[in-house]
Amino acid sequence: QVQLVESGGGLVQAGASLRLSCVASGRTISTTTMGWFRQAPGKEREFVGASRSGGSTTTADSVKGRFTISRDNAKNTVYLQMNSLKPEDTAVYHCAARPWATGQAMDVMSSYTYWGQGTQVTVSS
């Protein structure tokens, strides 16, 4: 069983930055694909980005150039650095773990087995 705990959310003004953290327990993330998803009020959960165990990352077009994913395997933690935040980035941000290779693209939500409870990010205009 893998537990994921996100932190770092908050209320910020447009243009500000935040760094979200996701600490995993129960399994090392060094061999695990870790993803970030977000869900805004009244909308479906959507892919933000992901980090493969080998270190490569991908981000959604909507956040490309503003958001960066990184990981610290020694701390069993994955990060989401969010810069130039916009009001439309307001959402609950969840991290997710995909311990086993599925052959699916990293943006496929159903391919992730474990999920955190999420952290709220609110961006005011």
Image: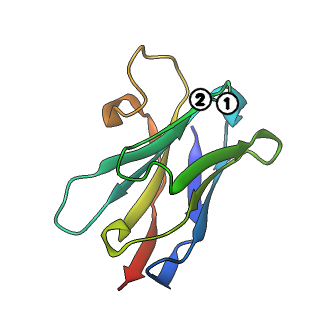
Image side of residue 81 versus residue 112, left or right: right
Q: Dot 2 corresponds to which residue?
A: 52
Tag 1 secondary structure: loop
Furthest-left residue in view? 42
Of residue 67 and residue 9, the one placed in the foreground of this image is: 67
Q: Residue at x 70, y 44 (%)?
A: 71
* Amino acid type at image mark 1: Gly
Q: Distance between the Cα atoms at labels 1 and 2?
A: 5 Å
Of residue 97 and residue 9, the one placed in the foreground of this image is: 9
Residue 97: percent from the left, percent from the top?
Answer: 52, 38
Q: Residue at x 57, y 72 (%)?
A: 17
Screen quadrant of the C terminus: bottom left
Residue 102: percent from the left, percent from the top?
Answer: 43, 16
Q: Dot 1 corresponds to which residue?
A: 55
Image side of residue 100 versus residue 108, left or right: right
**Would you say the residues marked 1 and 2 are in contact, meaning their CB atoms lie under 8 Å apart?**
yes
Q: Residue at x 55, y 27 (%)?
A: 99
Image side of residue 35 versus residue 124, left or right: right
Q: For the residue carrying disc 2, how many other residues have a C-alpha within 10 Å: few (<14), some (14-19), or many (20+)?
A: some
Screen quadrant of the N terminus: top right
* Amino acid type at image mark 2: Arg
Tag 2 secondary structure: loop
Q: Check the image and report above or below for 110 versus 125.
A: above
Q: Residue at x 42, y 13 (%)?
A: 103
Q: Check the image and report above or below for 87 versus 5.
A: below
The disc placed on residue 92 is none
